């Protein structure tokens, strides 16, 4: 199997604590004079973090779907008037497998345990986290939420086969003004 021309990158942005070193100013009295010294100390700091993961998918396994809502209204003369509504969010569907060991067609050099990776996707779905999905070949770079994630073993290779469905996440844009 040749290398996949479609790279699906999923980024999870979150806030987490990190231990940082800093120089702390300490003033001491030595021989009747105050002397300033700097001591290295650590403190817990809240910081933005990103976890990136590449999905090994082929072009046949990526499906994108977008729908629009319509309302059909009956008129007096037994005709039908169709009113177009709002666009619904794009739905992405992936089918593939997470390999149990590195394969030659995988584009990412970083390899993770497939069971822990499947559990990570399952946890992101349960938590309702918003993920940044980037598919450069299809021009997709939006925020999505995992709506369904099914995974399991099919054969004796210890590969995990999965089906993932993501829906585009919309943040409401509200205009505020002074009253």
Image (cartoon, rainbow, N blue to C red):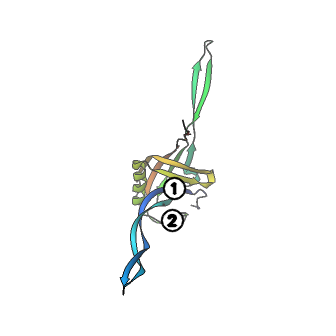
Residue 113 coordinates in the image, percent (x, y):
42, 63
Name the quadrant containing residue 115.
bottom left
Q: Residue at x 53, y 49 (%)?
A: 143
Check contact, mark 1 vs mark 2: CB within 8 A: no
Give the camera-side residue of 140 and 32. Answer: 32
Residue 176, given in percent of the width and then of the height, sits at 55, 40
Farthest top residue in view: 77
Say if 52 sits above or below 41 in the image.
above
Disc on the earlier residue, 1 or 2: 1
Residue 45 falls in which quadrant of the image? bottom left
Task: Say whether residue 18 is left or right of residue 106.
Answer: left
Picture disc at residue 10: 1
For the residue labelled by badge 2, is the local secondary structure a helix, a strand or a loop?
Answer: loop
In-image side of 27 versus 65 (left or right): left
Residue 21 makes an appearance in the image: yes
Q: Quadrant of the C terminus?
A: top right
Describe the element under mark 1 as helix, strand or loop: strand
Q: Which mark is residue 158?
A: none
Residue 64 horizontal/vertical position (percent): 57, 45
- Residue sitting nearer the eye, 56 or 34: 34
Whether residue 156 is visible: no
Task: Judge by depth and name the residue closer to the eye, 129 or 103.
Answer: 129
Which mark lies nearer to you, 1 or 2? 1
Number of numbered discs visible in the structure rendering: 2
The residue tagged 2 is 103
Q: Residue furthest front?
A: 32
């Amino acid at each position: 199997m040749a290398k996949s021309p479609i790279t699906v990158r999923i980024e999870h942005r979150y806030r987490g604590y990190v231990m940082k070193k800093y120089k702390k100013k300490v003033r001491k009295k030595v021989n009747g004079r105050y002397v300033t010294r700097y001591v290295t100390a650590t403190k817990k700091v809240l910081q933005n973090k990103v976890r990136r993961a590449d999905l090994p998918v082929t072009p046949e396994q990526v499906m994108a779907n977008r729908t629009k809502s319509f309302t059909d209204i009956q008129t007096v003369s037994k005709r039908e008037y169709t009113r177009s509504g709002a666009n619904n969010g794009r739905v992405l569907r992936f089918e593939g497998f997470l390999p149990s060991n590195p394969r030659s067609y995988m584009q990412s050099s970083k390899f993770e345990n497939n069971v822990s990776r499947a559990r990570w996707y399952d946890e992101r779905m349960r938590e309702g986290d918003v993920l940044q999905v980037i598919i450069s070949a299809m021009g997709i770079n939006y925020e999505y939420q995992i709506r369904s994630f099914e995974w399991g073993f099919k054969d004796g290779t210890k590969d995990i086969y999965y089906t993932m469905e993501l829906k585009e996440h919309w943040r409401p844009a509200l205009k505020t003004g002074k009253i």
